[in-house]
Amino acid sequence: MELRISGFEVIEARDGVAALRCVEKFSPDVVILDLQLPAAGGLDVRQELLTRPDTRDVPVIVVTGTDWSVPFPTAAVIRKTDLPSRVVTAVTHVLEAWT
C-alpha cells in the first residue's frame, strides 16, 4: 500500500510461480520478494531470476519475517518488522541507482 501511495505501480503475485509469470509478463524495474512464498519459495524464485538473461540484472529487494541469511545478491534486505516506509525508501534508492 505504501508503494502505491508513493506513486509506484505495483503488481502482486500470490506465490512464487505467479511471481515468475509476472516478472516475465511485466518486466519490472525492481522485484520485492518474500522468502517464504508458497508454490516455489523466494529462494527458488531468485535462483530462477538469476538464470534468465532477461531477469538476472533486475534488482531484488528481499522482505522477510525470518532471520535467514540471504545467499544471493540483493539490493536490500528488509525485515517485516521494519516500517513500511523502509520499503519505499529502498525502492527509491534502487531505482535511482539503476537510472
Image: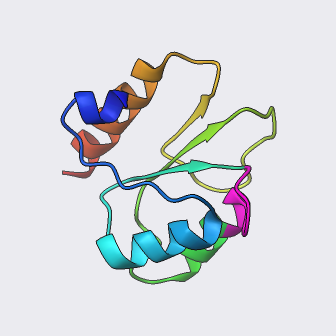
Q: Name the residue at 64% across, 19% down.
A: 81
Which of the pair 22/67 is nearer the observer? 22
Quadrant of the image containing the N terminus: top left
Q: Indicate the position of residue 90 as horizontal and vertical percent values.
A: 40, 32
Residue 55 showing in the rendered view? no
Q: From the image, give the main secondary structure of the stretch colored magenta.
A: loop
The total number of labels drawn is 0
Magenta segment includes 42: yes
Viewed as shown, does residue 3 lie left or right of 44?
Answer: left
Which of the pair 74/67 is nearer the observer? 67
Query: How is the structure coloured here?
Result: rainbow
Q: Name the residue at 50% across, 83% down.
A: 52
Q: Indicate the position of residue 74 as horizontal and vertical percent values.
A: 55, 49
Based on the displayed image, in which of its 4 quarters is residue 18 positioned?
bottom right
Viewed as shown, does residue 32 lie left or right of 99?
Answer: right
Q: Residue furthest front?
A: 14
Name above or below for residue 33 compared with residue 88. below
Based on the displayed image, in which of its 4 quarters is residue 87 positioned?
top left
Name above or below for residue 61 compared with residue 11. above
Span of residues in magenta: 36-44
Name above or below for residue 24 compared with residue 12. below
Which of the pair 18/78 is nearer the observer? 18
Name above or below for residue 16 compared with residue 33. below
Which of the pair 32/16 is nearer the observer? 16
Q: Indicate the position of residue 16 as horizontal and vertical percent values.
A: 63, 65
Q: Name the residue at 66% across, 56% down.
A: 72
Q: Indicate the position of residue 19 as horizontal and vertical percent values.
A: 52, 66
Magenta segment includes 75: no
Residue 23 showing in the rendered view? yes
